[in-house]
């Protein structure tokens, strides 16, 4: 990089010198054009001799510049040539392999559907196999599957082999279950569980498997490296009968808790949730959607301070949510908050949300399931509580005319509006908007705000692209004149 900086500095100096030289030559030319008989002839002869010497030196400089230009052209042409992959250093190859691993989502590719990229890499050639085997980050994404005896021992052997190859790198575990699993899991799985930094149970898993995994994790001695627990139902197999306690063995080092669509057998009550939050005070991300949280036995709870909380998403019963928002106390600025609006207006719930917002330094807000004929005043109330808000995302699928967008502005005069929350720089509209009224409301917001980015339904922007307009300008063209970045969603 230093060589490029030197070249850039030299180019600037050359441009400046060339400009000065040109001005001097022009002045000399004008002098000779206007000279008279009184001009000192001897002085002129000396100056002309000096100019001849300068021209000789310029010839040398020109030759050097020609050689330099040839060198730079050679570099430019060389950069256009594709680099053969076998010529790359092992460090770069390993980095490329790692990027492939990160982009591979096991939830989109069930275990039996396709080979894992790591398995493919290690079969290309001997050098790639050696490099892959000796790169620990390629082997820490391990999948475990229960529900069938066929291939079970092979699955365990492969998981243990991958664990060995991952070295000291903590494992990311994904658990699948096609059927009700065995009463007792293979004890060898225990040593895999204690090396894991994440437990992920996708939809094609089972609650029975999850309970037994946590039981084995507890029996194996737990660990101090488990950072993520994600259970995203509804699972293929759910449990019936008495509630199962699987959360008591979660260590205090947990940073991500992601619980979605769990049955009443797997869900915590509020007493248990508060106890878990108090124990895991380093939590950075909490997702609680479709979880049957019972209210517990206590009426009020002490504040649970979560100093590192960055993300909170809830879609719960309003009574439970009310207690949750009055209990959690984020301790850092920059919170991302995602809420699903209740089906029935509940003022006590709204008040609890507002109190939470006022003391939580929310900078990003996402609202889902908004009702256009009820939630506009609630949205305005929320915005008034968020002085640091910079990003707003709205799911207004039922709002064809963009009625809810009126909450973002305050009327000053008949045709003049100001921004209700002028700190907003990014506006995302996930769905909704379907007529000319929505178009007018959106333009009103763009004029009132200083938006840097707008994300809107692609079909809505396209709808008006081909329609006749008095000024001959499409909605998308108009938006791009006023906003730095305009993106389209797929809806």
Image: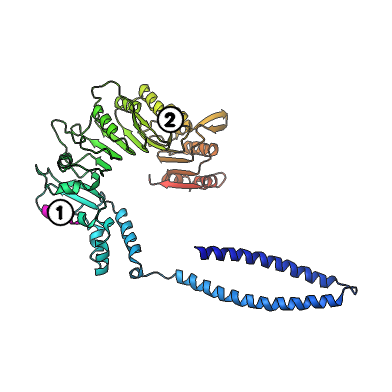
x%, y% of residue 35? 86, 72
Position of 1 with respect to 54 (left or right) is left
Position of 180 with respect to 130 (left or right) is left
* Residue at x 32%, y 65% (from the top left corner): 90
For the stretch drawn in magenta, the main secondary structure is helix
x%, y% of residue 202? 23, 44
Along the line of sight, the residue nearer the viewer: 320 or 65? 65
Residue for badge 1? 155
x%, y% of residue 364? 42, 38
Task: Please state, as top left, top right, bottom left or bottom right, where the C terminus lies in the image.
Answer: top left
* Residue at x 13%, y 56% (from the top left corner): 154
* Residue at x 31%, y 40% (from the top left corner): 255
**Of the two numbered discs 1 and 2 in the rendering, the one whose residue sits closer to the viewer:** 1
Q: Does residue 451 appear in the picture of this structure?
A: yes
Q: Secondary structure at mark 2?
A: helix
Magenta stretch holds residue 154: yes
Magenta segment = 152-161
């Amino acid at each position: 990089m230093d060589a490029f900086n030197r070249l850039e500095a030299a180019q600037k100096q050359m441009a400046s010198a060339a400009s000065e030289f040109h001005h001097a030559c022009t002045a000399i030319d004008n002098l000779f054009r206007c000279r008279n008989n009184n001009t000192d002839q001897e002085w002129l002869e000396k100056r002309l001799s000096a100019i001849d010497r300068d021209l000789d030196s310029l010839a040398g400089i020109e030759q050097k510049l020609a050689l330099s230009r040839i060198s730079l052209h050679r570099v430019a042409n060389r950069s256009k040539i594709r680099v053969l992959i076998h010529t790359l250093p092992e460090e770069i190859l390993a980095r490329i392999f790692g990027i492939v691993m990160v982009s591979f989502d096991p939830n989109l590719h069930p275990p039996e559907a396709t080979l894992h990229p790591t398995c493919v890499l290690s079969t290309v050639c001997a050098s790639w196999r050696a490099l892959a085997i000796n790169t620990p980050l390629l082997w820490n994404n391990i999948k475990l599957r229960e529900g069938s005896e066929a291939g079970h021992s092979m699955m365990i052997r492969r998981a243990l082999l991958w664990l060995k190859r991952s070295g000291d790198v903590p494992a990311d575990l994904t658990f699948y279950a096609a059927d009700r699993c065995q009463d007792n899991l293979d004890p060898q799985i225990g040593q895999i569980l204690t090396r894991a930094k994440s437990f992920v149970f996708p939809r094609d898993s089972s609650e029975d498997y999850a309970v037994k995994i946590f039981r084995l994790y507890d029996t194996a001695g737990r660990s101090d490296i488990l950072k993520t627990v994600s259970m995203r139902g509804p699972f293929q197999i759910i449990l019936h009968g008495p509630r199962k306690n699987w959360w008591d063995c979660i260590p205090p080092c947990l940073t991500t808790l992601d619980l979605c669509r769990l049955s009443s057998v797997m869900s915590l009550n509020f007493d248990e949730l508060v106890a878990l939050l108090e124990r895991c005070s380093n939590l950075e991300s909490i997702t609680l959607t479709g979880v049957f949280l019972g209210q517990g036995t206590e009426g009020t709870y002490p504040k649970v301070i979560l100093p590192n909380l960055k993300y909170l998403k809830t879609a719960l019963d309003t009574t439970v949510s009310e207690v949750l928002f009055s209990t959690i106390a984020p301790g850092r600025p920059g919170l991302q908050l995602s809420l699903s609006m209740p089906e029935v207006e509940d003022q006590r719930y709204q008040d609890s949300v507002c109190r939470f917002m006022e003391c939580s330094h929310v900078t990003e807000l996402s609202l889902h399931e908004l009702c256009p004929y009820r939630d506009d005043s609630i949205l305005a109330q929320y915005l008034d509580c968020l002085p640091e808000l910079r990003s707003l995302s709205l799911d207004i699928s039922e709002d064809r005319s963009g009625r809810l967008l009126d909450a973002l502005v305050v009327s000053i005069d008949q045709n003049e509006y100001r921004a209700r929350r002028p700190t907003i720089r990014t506006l995302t509209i996930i769905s909704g908007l379907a007529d000319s009224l929505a178009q007018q409301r959106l333009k009103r917001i763009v004029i009132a705000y200083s938006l840097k980015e707008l994300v809107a339904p692609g079909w809505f922007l396209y709808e008006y692209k081909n329609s006749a307009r008095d000024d001959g300008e499409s909605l998308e063209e108009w938006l791009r004149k006023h906003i730095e970045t305009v993106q389209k969603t797929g809806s």
